[in-house]
Amino acid sequence: MKYRSSYERSAYLYDLFDKKPNIGFFLRCASGIKEILDIGAGTGRIALPLAEKGCRVFCVEPSPAMRREFRKKLRKQKDIADRIILNAGEARSFRFDRTFGFALMSGVFDHFLDDGYRLAALRNISRHLEPGGRFIFDLAGARPKVHQNSVAGERRSVKRSIRRFVSTQSYGKDRYRVTILYEVHDSGKMRKRVEEMGLVGFVSQRGIRIMLHEAGFQIVHEYGGYDSSDYAEGGNVLIIEALKKPDLREAH
Ligand SMILES: C[S@@+](CC[C@H](N)C(=O)[O-])C[C@H]1O[C@@H](n2cnc3c(N)ncnc32)[C@H](O)[C@@H]1O
């Protein structure tokens, strides 16, 4: 699977619409941790609040446009800039010459389209964790619903309104094509349309459990929401907390 970005045209609008209530969740999970790996860090939506709490955050982000938005924010927060390391790279192949006690990945796993990529990415993340290191990430808990041009948010200021529409189509087995359209209106007049198209994949809870096991992880919790409620089958989101199993060969 070749990495294809679906954020290049719309990265500057990303933070306006991604209001997932998960920043508090990750801050709680990372409480007391000094150094964190954030894979697919996007615009730094989660990395920056972690750095504000004093963590050093090592970020990997493949989209040039998302990295640009991240850097723009960093320029305004000079006091924490030295606690953020932002690298280009993708989940399967990024490299840091060190390991971490904690890794997070939010909103990224669904972009992995086949089991080969998923397993390679999980193995690479596992390689970057210390034995016993914690990995927390989220993925779709159920198959996406197929629909056309549903309104998915509107942001208004005095003169400007931006509406977002989402369409989801089936695209082969366990793959979906998601089209996001932003319409920007100034003083009631349409000024711009920005369209982004990307593919997402779906993997069952059983499938992800098997892959995590193969990549050397032990699952310690499966949440169904960022309020730390338990996952129930068919829930929108599945949040997995896993530990890297100690490498028994090294113990002998
Ligand atoms: C929905 S955004 C989430 C961004 C950020 N983690 C957050 O929660 O705000 C998904 C991010 O995953 C990145 N991404 C997509 N494919 C990836 C891959 N193969 N490896 C690492 N990151 C990837 C995208 O470029 C994008 O920034």
Image: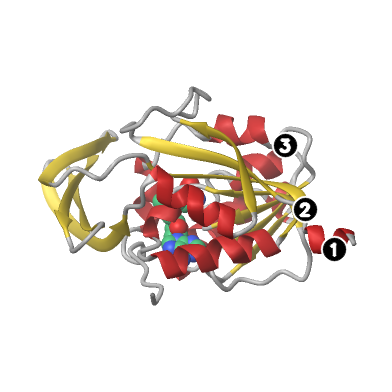
Question: Residue at the spot x=12%, y=41% of the render?
Answer: 188
Q: Is residue 59 above or below residue 230?
A: below
Q: Residue at x 38, y 50 (%)?
A: 14
The disc labelled 2 sits on which kind of residue? Pro
Q: Position of residue 90 (x, y in %)?
A: 52, 69
Residue highlighted by disc 2? 246
Q: Quadrant of the N terminus?
A: bottom left
Q: Badge 3 is on which residue?
A: 53
User: 98 and 201: which one is in front?
Assistant: 201
Of pointers 3 and 2, the one earlier in the residue sequence = 3
Q: Which residue is mark 1?
A: 250
For the residues carrying marks 1 and 3, which lies nearer the camera in this image?
Answer: 1
Decide which of 208, 19 is in the foreground and name it: 208
Residue shown at the point (39%, 42%) measured from the top left: 18
Looking at the image, can residue 91 be seen? Answer: no
Q: Residues within 10 Å of mark 1 (few under 14, many from 20)?
A: few
Q: Quadrant of residue 249?
A: bottom right
Name the N-terminal-most of marks 1 and 3: 3
Task: Check contact, mark 2 vs mark 1: CB within 8 A.
Answer: yes
Q: Position of residue 58 (x, y in %)?
A: 68, 58
> Is 167 on the left-hand or right-hand side of 248?
left
